[in-house]
Amino acid sequence: MEKAGSMPIGVFDSGLGGLTVAREIMRNLPNERIVYFGDTARVPYGSKSKNTIVRYSRQIVRFLKTQDIKAIVIACNTATALAIDEVSEEAGMPVIGVVEPGARMAAESTRNGKVGVIATRATIHTHAYSNAIRRINPDIRVFSQAGALLVPLVEEGWVHDRVTDEIIMRYLDDLLEHGIDTLILGCTHYPLLRSTIRKLVGDEVTLINPAYETAKELGRMLACRGLESTGTIEEGEPYPYKFFVSDDPDKFTSFANSILPVDVKMAKIVPIEEY
Ligand code: DGL
């Protein structure tokens, strides 16, 4: 199966945030090649309707299928929550989203049966995380909070800032009052706020990073289907990681270089509306 194994994994997101998922795949599955698409022209998805997110996601899948990929990872929580069924139908290959792996780890981690979720408004409205957790354990209580202001703060680089601390606390106050002992960082950007959130919530609350859980789940799925890459990526291999965007490649590459363990030289623009 090495031919299939050496094919890349298609990873997509509404923009830059999904690079937190790509980063975990690079760290945890270093032999896997990646084609990443960030929909930087149409971000954010978190404030859009289901119809729009489904249409965008289908277009992205059609584009990714031109790249000879073996599986798709929906790195975006919002696209996973609103469009995973439609993406799976369009893809005709294995598809993994970030919600199930994150929900599973939260259900395993909680000791008092109270889990908090912060995510975009669209993700919270679908109840995707709470439904997934309750399917695993109906006794777990899930408390949710939309955190609309956090994505722009991260993209502005205000990760360690008094203003960001205050906004995070406004969002988390209610959840903490409910006595949660586990918190899902249910948006691609929130793992980048992890140390700030840790400082604010203390050591008693377990933070769940769906990006990390998704990379592990991807590894299990590839192994189980005989799709994993068994050969290593040679140093100097021209493009083990390819990046595509729908707009503003420079902003994308500079963000990518600030968080990825590899040097990203360029991102190509794709006219995604044509797919
Ligand atoms: N990638 C989105 C998510 O994980 C956050 C940014 C957006 O709203 O598009 O939900």
Image (spheres, grey):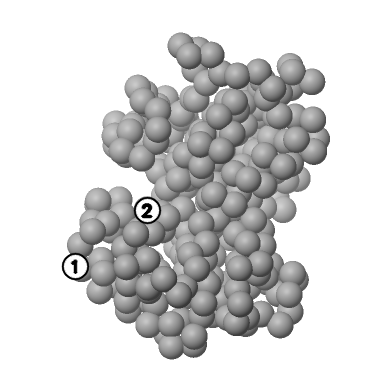
Residue drawn 54% across the image and 49% down it: 212
Which percent across, then down, holds residue 102? Answer: 60, 59
Residue drawn 55% across the image and 29% down it: 30
Residue 209 vs 168, above or below: the answer is above
Asked if residue 116 can be seen in this view, the reply is no
On the rendered structure, is 182 left or right of 94?
left
CA separation in Å, label 1 and label 2: 16 Å
Nearest the eye: 62 or 212: 212
Q: Quadrant of the N terminus?
A: top right
Which percent across, then down, holds residue 122? Answer: 51, 65
Q: The disc labelled 1 sits on which kind of residue?
A: Arg
Graded by Cα atoms within 10 Å as few (under 14), some (14 to 19) or many (20 or more), the crowding at tag 2 reads some
On the rendered structure, is 227 left or right of 216?
right
On the rendered structure, is 266 left or right of 91?
left
Cβ of disc 1 within 8 Å of ligand 1?
no
Residue 69 vs 121, above or below: the answer is above
Which percent across, then down, holds residue 258? Answer: 31, 38
Graded by Cα atoms within 10 Å as few (under 14), some (14 to 19) or many (20 or more), the crowding at tag 1 reads few
Sequence-wise, which precedes: disc 1 or disc 2? Answer: 1
Q: The disc labelled 2 sits on which kind of residue?
A: Leu
Residue drawn 31% across the image and 63% down it: 196
Residue 177 vs 167, above or below: the answer is below
In the structure shown, which secondary structural element does the residue marked by tag 1 occupy?
helix
Residue labelled with disc 1: 162
Residue labelled with disc 2: 192
Asked if residue 201 can be seen in this view, the reply is yes
In the structure shown, which secondary structural element does the residue marked by tag 2 occupy?
helix
CB of mark 1 within 8 Å of CB of mark 2? no
Q: Quadrant of residue 164?
A: bottom left
Q: Quadrant of residue 94?
A: top right
State the residue lying farthest toward the front.
203
Which percent across, then down, holds residue 229? Answer: 68, 25
